[in-house]
Amino acid sequence: MDTLLFCKNFEYKCDYKLIVHLVNVSIIGVLVLSQMLFPISANDIKLAQTSVPIQDKNSSQIKEKILNEISPETRQKNFDLMIKQKFPKAIVNDVTDGVKHIKLTKYYSGRPVRINVVEVDFNLAKDLELTPALSSSQNLKSRRTITTIAKNNNAIVALNGTYFKPQTGVPLGTLMIDEKMYTGPIYDRVAMGIFDDGFDIARVQFTSTVKGSGHTINVNNINQPRMLSTHVIVYTPEWGKYSPYAPKYGVGLLVVDDKIVKASANPIQIPDNGYVISGPKKQLYQLLEKKKVKLDIKTTPEWKGVKHIISGGPYLVKNGEVFVDMTAQKLGSIGGRNPRSAIGYTADNNFILVAVDGREGSSIGMTLMELANFMKSIGCVNAMNLDGGGSTVMYVNGQVVNKPQARGGIPLSNAIILSKTSQS
């Protein structure tokens, strides 16, 4: 094993046949050692006589795994082959190491649907990171084209993100970037958590609190439209210059450096180092006794170590099975055949982005069930729908690659992007 590490440190310049030989020797060593540590019983011998191919298969899998880990050339060849087998009739372009752009057409009831797919193997694309991106880092009430968002973030790939309020651009649903929560969930809709070592998808709830003067008050959301007058909402500087009017029988509390410095039912100016808590007077006045407060923002699931969260809905694939919970997530209005955007990930943590054109003769779009089946067919073990319709737009290497209804795509609130890491 010391020899293998020696090769790795010298940037894989070893002879490939030598690597294969060393791997075979290593596997034999592991198998011999396992027999020394775990002696074979009579029953084991009887089983081995009938299952030698299993050992051969396991040895082959171990060898392939080791070769993939120590030889980027082998992993790249396997990635190339996998994409060709998965998309046999598609046009496949290399975006950069570990990133493929696939263009294909499928037919439903004899009618065409144009699909753009980007698949990423992060074991090869080590200098790239996946993040949500706002159209403006300063203000949630902003909309820009995907080309502008991509260029502002030096992105090589971008896909439109979560739902947003058309009039303002404020994202509707959970959005966390670099561990900072910008907006909270609505209707417990599904969201994707992005971690350093992978992904997760779940329906997300807001379980935040504000504590002070011996009281704990539940916070219903952050930087989202008010659903009920009884809800407690937090507004940060990203919401805008001023908080909204407080609800009927309500009040807004300005907090600066964890201290309440102002109470008013009128809009309150939000400083860079503060936020406004807005809700019923009966609840919030309890905090005024000592005026020191602590805001604790949490979600369920807690997702320890999550770096980014982007919401969508509904589910498309859940634990390897087609699962479309449109009604449960209050998304009944997005049914039918439409342009679609989706994201998902495979069992080995390859990430997949999809844009489907629709509402035209040359591409009629997909239903959610068709999209869910497509995501499963290309290997997603978990996948979710994003904002679609007129919002569906994909950008790859400097240009929009699909054909959105508006040339270049409509101005968007946010996107999910693939860009160079800050360390590279």
Image (cartoon, grey):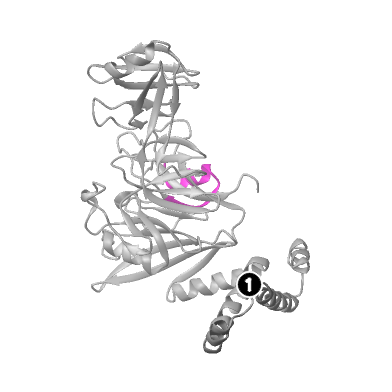
Give the vertical position of 211 relative to 301 (above or below): above
Q: Residue furthest front?
A: 42
Q: Residue at x 44, y 44 (%)?
A: 309
Q: Residue at x 44, y 19 (%)?
A: 293
User: In the rendered view, does 188 fall on the left or right side of 418?
Assistant: left
Q: Residue at x 26, y 58 (%)?
A: 359
Image quarter of residue 414: top left
Could you tell me if residue 240 is visible in this image? no
- The magenta segment is 144-159
Residue 387 in picture, x, y percent from top left: 33, 49
Of 122 and 394, nearer the camera is 122
Residue 98 in picture, x, y percent from top left: 57, 62
User: In the rendered view, does 346 fall on the left or right side of 63?
Assistant: left
Of 329 and 295, nearer the camera is 295
Q: For the N terminus, which image quadrant?
A: bottom right
Q: Is residue 150 magenta?
A: yes
The residue beneath circle 1 is 74
User: In the rendered view, does 136 fall on the left or right side of 205?
Assistant: right
Question: Callout 1 environment at 10 Å: few (<14), some (14 to 19), or many (20+)?
Answer: some
Q: Residue at x 39, y 32 (%)?
A: 208
Q: Is residue 37 magenta?
A: no
Image quarter of residue 167: top left
Name the element at disc 1: helix
Instruction: Name the residue type under label 1.
Output: Thr
Q: Residue furthest bottom?
A: 49
Could you tell me if residue 292 is visible in this image? yes
Residue 54 in picture, x, y percent from top left: 54, 82
Residue 76 in picture, x, y percent from top left: 60, 69
